[in-house]
């Protein structure tokens, strides 16, 4: 933004500025990773002072929680559509895994949800986020119970939560820091000890789905 900063006054102007901030934050995260983007980075890229960004979002973490919910809604929509075409735990696990793999930003945001993004935000923001998460788990859980009749909707919701936990552990392996990349180049057997993301995620989700009816 080359023009001098002008405060957005009308509701539509405020909405446009919020969307501009979210768009820039998304682009920066896709380029550098969520953990490496600061509030100053976002402010600079959108052409505002940090204090002006904070007029629209309380913290950096709040920005990324909003992006997580947006990306999560896209993920849930894709999963819901695909679950209508499959049946059985293996196929269901593949649907969940593929929807994550196709959305690396959502994987990255999921990785940092509990450890970073739920910190330094207000109670009201957390309330919105947690209600969204619960609603999403249950909505997809109901779809899973149709594709896998041996699973209840509660089992399906638990499977979604478990899949997210597996993503949080497995996805960072796909983006090793520079020192680890150097180590893997020097020691290929160390690199080979870490499993590939998609097949490992599918296998873990499928194993969980198969085991859920046995431990009710």
Image (tube, rainbow, N blue to C red):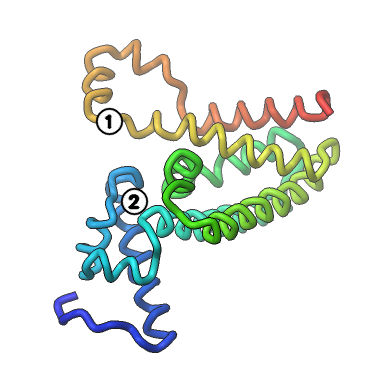
Q: Position of residue 57 (x, y in %)?
A: 39, 65
The residue lying furthest to the front in this view is 123
Q: Look at the numbered disc 2 and give the secondary structure of its residue.
A: helix
Residue 177, numbered circle: 1
Above or below for 209 versus 92: above
Residue 86 or residue 130, whichever sits in front = 130
Q: Is residue 151 left or right of residue 60?
A: right
**Residue 101 in sight:** no
**Residue 95 in sight:** yes
Residue at x 69%, y 37% (from the top left corner):
159
Q: Look at the numbered disc 1 and give the secondary structure of its residue.
A: loop
Q: Position of residue 7 (x, y in %)?
A: 28, 82
Residue 149, numbered circle: none
Residue at x 33%, y 51% (from the top left corner):
29
Q: Is residue 59 left or right of residue 159?
A: left
Q: Name the image quarter holding residue 216.
A: top right
Residue that carries the numbered disc 2 in the rendered image? 30
Q: Position of residue 156 (x, y in %)?
A: 74, 42
Q: Position of residue 133 (x, y in %)?
A: 62, 52
Residue at x 48%, y 44% (from the top left corner):
113
- CA gap between label 2 and label 1 equals 15 Å
Residue at x 36%, y 87% (from the top left corner):
9
- Cβ–Cβ under 8 Å for marks 2 and 1: no
């Amino acid at each position: 933004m080359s023009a001098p900063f002008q405060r957005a006054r009308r509701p539509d102007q405020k909405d446009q500025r919020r969307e501009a901030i979210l768009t820039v934050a998304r682009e920066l995260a896709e380029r550098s990773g969520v953990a490496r983007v600061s509030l100053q980075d976002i402010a600079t890229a959108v052409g505002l002072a940090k204090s002006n960004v904070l007029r629209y979002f309380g913290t950096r973490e709040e920005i990324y929680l909003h992006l997580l919910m947006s990306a999560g809604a896209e993920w849930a929509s894709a999963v819901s559509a695909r679950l209508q075409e499959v049946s059985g735990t293996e196929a269901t696990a593949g649907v969940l895994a593929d929807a994550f793999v196709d959305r690396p930003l959502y994987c990255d945001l999921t990785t940092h949800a509990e450890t970073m993004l739920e910190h330094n935000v207000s109670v009201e923001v957390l309330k919105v986020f947690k209600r969204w998460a619960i609603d999403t788990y249950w909505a997809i859980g109901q779809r899973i119970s149709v594709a896998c009749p041996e699973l209840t909707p509660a089992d399906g919701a638990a499977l979604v939560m478990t899949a997210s936990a597996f993503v949080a552990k497995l996805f960072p392996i796909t983006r090793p820091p520079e020192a680890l990349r150097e180590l893997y180049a020097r020691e290929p057997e160390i690199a080979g000890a870490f499993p590939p993301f998609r097949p490992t995620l599918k296998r873990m989700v499928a194993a969980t789905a198969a085991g859920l009816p046995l431990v009710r």
